[in-house]
Image: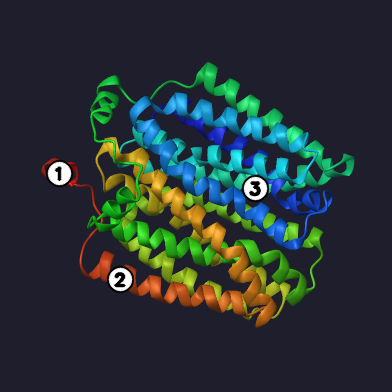
Amino acid sequence: MKQKSLFIIFLIVFIDLLGFSLILPLLPFYAESFGATPIQIGLLVASYAAAQFIGAPILGRFSDRFGRRPVLMISIFGSFIGFLLLGFAGTLWVLFTARLLDGFTGGNISVAQAYITDITNEKNRARGLGLIGAAFGLGFIIGPAIGGVLSEFGYAVPALFAAGFSILAFLGATVFLQESLDPETRLTLSKKNSDEFRLKNYLNNLSRPRVGPLLNIRFFYSLAFSTFQTIFPLYALYHLELSARNTGFVLTYVGVLVVFVQGFLVSKISNRFRDNRIIFTSLFILMFSLFAWAFVPSVAALLIILIPLAFSTGTLNTVLNSALSKSVTPEEVGGTLGISASLESLTRVISPSTGGWLLGSLGTWAPGVFSGIIMIFTVGYAYRRLISQTEIHPQTSQELIQETVRNSSE
């Protein structure tokens, strides 16, 4: 691996997520100061994920055609503008505009992941992608704490602070980041048909024997886990009567666990076991963890349950993307990871409303049971498609050529 480039990507992702996590916990209060209703606040939160759902595959495909570096720089600058708009917003519609812009450009995580696959080989790719996951975790650990302190000076201050971090990431990419795709690869991609941004591209990928199962698993796993993420603060309040401060401490605890898993454990596990076995086992652990979360009786028990939950999700986030990158040609990595990120964003549009309705209508146990039931289906599907039928392994050159020809003829 090119250690310098890896460090720059880590720094870019960390700063990007730090800016994002500065804003996320404060956004409902900021919107409320403009007179937003609960429904409007829900739409505002979902607007970011909806825009990311659209933007992620587009940015991924653009990075395949024009290079990772320019797309990363444009997307980081877009987030900078989004945070500025947020900080200087005078009306609710400006808040929506800011979140839509930042959401669309926030799809750059798939480009960062593609960059990692460019500069790593199949042996150390999981480690490289794990560092991106660690950058995610560190950003979510530090960001809410800083945002909470800065909010004492007004809700606009954290947004402007996040804008400052974004411009630092932009300057870092400008000065230190080198392009990872060679001109010949980009030329090959530029000759592909112009059909790749349509819904047909999603369907084509879902029908591919290696890629399709992984994308389906990504969607249903993300749907279950994002229900946990989006509903947890309300669950903590109504079920365990935790204050906002103590809820933040619990989420920081989860972030520390995820950083440890993605930064240190994933590479060791990946060196010993096949990707399909790791994915299946992690899904199985997550299934039991979510059911246990639904009925946890105390904070102490919750802290214990969160250990396997953090382990399984931290592992899945890394190994699923690593397996996807090994299942396509090098030229398709950016677009495929973009589709994966886009599907994950779609689940963050669905989960807040679904989980909130379940909690309010049935009880605090309902989101956990709902997520666990989704995981039962996902575990069964993963067993059929990854364990009993096939093994996830690097494709041979002949397999890649044959699959590329089939895709080009579709």
Residue 227: x and y, percent?
A: 58, 66
Residue 71: x and y, percent?
A: 46, 28
Q: Which residue is mark 1?
A: 409
Q: Which residue is mark 3?
A: 140
Q: Is residue 11 above or below residue 212?
A: above
- Under tag 2, what secondary structure? helix
> Which amino acid type corresponds to the residue marked 2 in the rendered image?
Tyr
Q: Give me the C-alpha separation between circle 1 and circle 3.
A: 43 Å
Q: Is residue 98 above or below residue 221?
A: above
Residue 131 visible from this viewpoint: no
Q: Is residue 89 above or below residue 202?
A: above
Of residue 210 and residue 246, the one placed in the foreground of this image is 210
Q: Give me the C-alpha separation between circle 2 and circle 3.
A: 32 Å
Residue 96: x and y, percent?
A: 67, 45
> Which amino acid type corresponds to the residue marked 3 in the rendered image?
Phe
Q: Residue at x 69, y 35 (%)?
A: 83
